[in-house]
Amino acid sequence: MERSLYERLGVSRDADTNEIKKAFKKLAMTHHPDKGGDPEEFKKIQHAHEILTDDNKRKVYDMTGSDTGEMPQGMPFGGGPFGGFGGGPFGGVPFDMGDLFGGMFGMGGGGPPQGVRVKRAQGPPKTIEIPLSLKDFYHGKTLEIKFERHKFCEACKGEGATSFSSCDTCKGMGKVRQIMMMGPIQMVNEAPCRDCNGNGRKAAGNCYVCGGKKTKVQEKTIVLKIEPGMKPRDVLVFPKECSDDPNYEEPGDVHFLLQEASGDENWTRVVDELETFVNINLKESLLGCEKTLTGHPGYPDGLTLTIPAGVKHTETIIFNQKGMVKKGGGFGDLHCKIHISVTDKDREILKRNHVVLNAMFV
């Protein structure tokens, strides 16, 4: 009895492609004519490798026993020398029936026929970054954002034409019947017509408004209201304001992503708190003082702070309710880091009085 292709290569029926390739290479080292092997035997090994490493040809072989790579004509569903769809020396069908009929009728393993477009629910969102200053986040701001988008032509409702003719292929039915004989059994399948995408009609001419493009450019203006206390990375969502897309039932949403623009490096926002630093001299640190800071988003004329006596270099003083405005009301805190500057004259006086400065002083 003629050996099966699997037996020729010395592998099991459930061997994967890598195992089959390795087995072939091993046998080729012995049976290749250049190595002194039998040319006819090598041809059989090579043929087995070709069939079993091709997924489609291997499926046909496993199902029918045909090693030509093609489905035999008139192959019945049951019986036959190869056991048909059950039993037999080849163990029946090793794959899903959907794989077979999907390939025959262009269904792609259960999906829609090739060429027929299936619309998904909603298109992907579009993100637009909006840079804002610290002042904008503190007080809030109203912006008008203008951008262009494509919307379905109102004259043709996004179909590219205002007049249509019946599809000759499906006779206006939108679907076609496909018949295939499998031995004595007739297989009938209904599928959407590829020529008209299942619509049953074809455009008779381009739309006079959009010229067949289906969409027209439209300028859109969106009013963006930034509430006081909003934060960087906050997102404002405007539903279904993206361009129309024939692949989707509804347009996607527009997302406005708030970002902090570069500004005064002396001021840093941390959630609802503000951080800054204050430069004072040695005398001010010993006796205390008042300092007016500029750049605070809530105090355009400057913020005056009282620095207590005896403050230390690099110490952080917290001023309650002097930070960022909070969304919904209230304020965060202000964190001021103290920098004490010491002059050469100060150092000389302190040296005469036997006062040793911390090395961190500047």
Image (cartoon, rainbow, N blue to C red):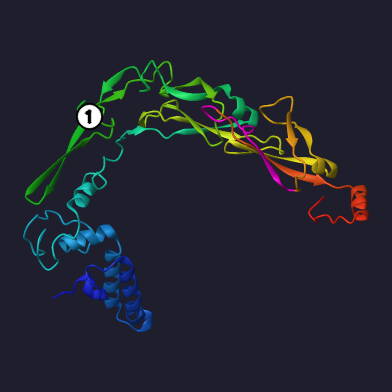
Specify start and end residues of the magenta stretch as a single range: 314-329
Residue 235 rendering spot, x and y as whole percentages = 50, 33
Q: Nearer the viewer, residue 54 or 117?
A: 117
Q: Nearer the viewer, residue 156 or 301?
A: 301
The amino acid on which the numbered mark 1 sits, given as a three-letter code, is Gly
Look at the picture and state if 283 lies above or below 183: above
Residue pushed farthest bottom? 36
Q: Is residue 200 in sight in this rendering?
A: yes
Indicate the secondary structure of the residue bearing disc 1.
loop
Residue 338 rendering spot, x and y as whole percentages = 74, 44
Report the predominant secondary structure element of the magenta stretch: loop
Look at the picture and state if 200 lies above or below 309: above
User: From the viewer's perspective, is 270 left or right of 98?
Assistant: right
Look at the picture and state if 360 lies above or below 338: below
- Classed neighbour count for the residue bearing mark 1: other residues with Cα under 10 Å, few (<14), some (14–19), many (≥20): many
Q: Is residue 133 in sight in this rendering?
A: no
User: From the viewer's perspective, is 142 left or right of 248?
Assistant: right
Residue 91 rendering spot, x and y as whole percentages = 13, 65
Q: Which residue is mark 1?
A: 174
- Within the image, what quadrant is residue 130 found in? top right
Q: Magenta stretch containing residue 309, yes or no?
A: no
Give the residue displayed 24% in from the left and 75% down from the top. Answer: 8
Q: Nearer the viewer, residue 137 or 194?
A: 137
- Within the image, what quadrant is residue 275 found in? top right
